[in-house]
Amino acid sequence: MTLTSATVFDDGLSFFDGVVAQIQPGDWDKPSPCAGWTALDVLGHLSTALNMGASLLNGEQPTWPEFDRPADLVEGDPAEYYRAAAQRCREALVGADLELEMDTPMGKRTVADRLAFPAIDLYVHGWDVAEAAGIQVEIPQDVIDFTHAYIDPFPADVVRGANGAFGPEADVAPHASPTEAFLAWTGRTPL
């Protein structure tokens, strides 16, 4: 079965929730694989993706908050902050018009198409937070396949680098797991 962005997004909310459920309060201040960011910074950054997803599902253009550090976006208890954001996304997903076309810098795109990036972010950043806390997670193969199907057609300069979603591909061990190989493809290496 081919996954849709809505399914990956919905399942990704649960995936990230599973990571958050294992995080101890002190883990939020630990460094993440994202250079210069703590696990709390990753959560703050992810909150912009979740807000984008909820806006898209509601048929609205996303807005971007201003902040000095992504962690500044997280209000109160990080786990509760995430759960509230995830609940807003789940509510917006119910009855959303995924075929609605919206204007983007790349022309008209459907909500389903635009939802793919926030959906992928839930898994990649779920791994980032888990890695910061020393928690082992595996990204499902069908999500890895979905990500490649969505991302691979984009030019490398759009995907990688200072303004892209990923850094340069990292080296991967010959016997790496599918998750390890995928994360190396996104430019990540374990801490």
Image: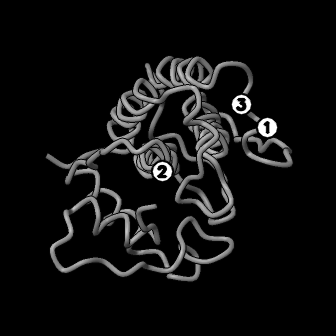
Cα separation, mark 1 vs mark 3, equals: 6 Å
Task: Tell me if residue 29 comes above or below residue 86 in the rendering.
Answer: below
| Labelled disc at residue 128 | 2
Task: Pick whichever of labels 2 and 3 is earlier in the sequence.
Answer: 3
Q: Which residue is mark 3?
A: 74
Q: Nearer the viewer, residue 157 or 60?
A: 157
Q: Residues within 10 Å of mark 3 (few under 14, many from 20)?
A: some
| Labelled disc at residue 27 | none
Amino acid on which disc 1 is placed: Asp
Q: Nearer the viewer, residue 119 or 172?
A: 172
Cα separation, mark 1 vs mark 2, equals: 18 Å
Task: Tell me if residue 86 comes above or below residue 127 in the rendering.
Answer: above
The quadrant where residue 79 appears? top right
Where is residue 108? Give x, y as percent: 59, 57
Where is residue 46? Give x, y as percent: 59, 42
Q: Secondary structure at mark 1?
A: helix
Question: Do residues under tags 1 and 3 come within 8 Å of each other at their CB atoms?
Answer: yes
